[in-house]
Image (spheres, helix red, strand yellow):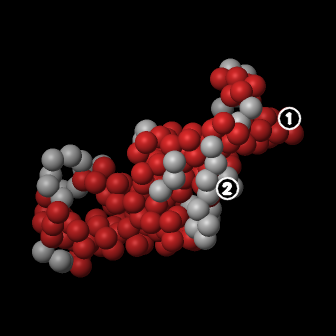
Amino acid sequence: MIVEDSILEGCIAGKRSAQALLYKKFAGTMLGVCMRYSSSRVEAEDIAQEGFIKVFQRITSFRKEGSFEGWMKRIMINQALNHYRKSRKVPYHSVIEEIDETEILDMEEPEPLNPIPADTLLAMIQKLPEGYRMVFNLYVFEEYSHKEIAESMNVSESTSKTQLLKARRLLRKNILSLKQTK
């Protein structure tokens, strides 16, 4: 989606009507981003709402060097990460050496599966434990490296790798279980 310059300029000027148009245009897309990082729609709506507040507060810093939607998406992801950090009571640390090598080998060659409806897959992702969900989304959808994930989540790189492996394993188990019930 491309945002018209008049809407962007109106938002920079603080015009509520321009902000409403911008919100209406991008609310669904940004809620979708937030849904991947949250465990419920209510939580995603809170993250998106806080994200839009930051968008409007920081809109003057948008340099028009990339897409506006990409800039907004980055704010939403950062808001989700902030929400994760605030809600985390005890930092989770694990090392990759704890994973049996045969488990890694099992994950390398998944059997082919029929397509799963997007809403079903999203629900499975939302049910992942919080750390797994955050790492999975950042790695798979945002294409962060384990180093970037470790820095943004304040964990070690090996913890990021472990969380991703466990998330994939749990998703695979849930998908296989779903396929067996059909």
Find numbered disc 2 in the image and state the secondary structure of the residue it sits on: loop
Would you place residue 8 above or below residue 2 in this image? below
Disc 2 residue type? Pro
Query: Residue 99 location in percent, x, y?
Result: 71, 36
Query: Residue 5 location in percent, x, y?
Result: 13, 58
Disc 1 residue type? Gln
Q: Is residue 95 left or right of residue 46?
A: right
Q: Is residue 55 left or right of residue 137?
A: left
Q: Residue at x 40, y 73 (%)?
A: 50
Whichever of labels 1 and 2 marks the residue nearer the N terminus, that label is 2
Q: Quadrant of the C terminus?
A: top right
Residue 42, quarter of picture: bottom right
Query: Residue 33 location in percent, x, y?
Result: 46, 54
Q: Residue at x 24, y 53 (%)?
A: 68
The residue where tag 2 is placed is: 129
Would you place residue 140 above or below residue 105 in this image? below
78 or 156, which is in the foreground? 156
The residue where tag 1 is placed is: 180
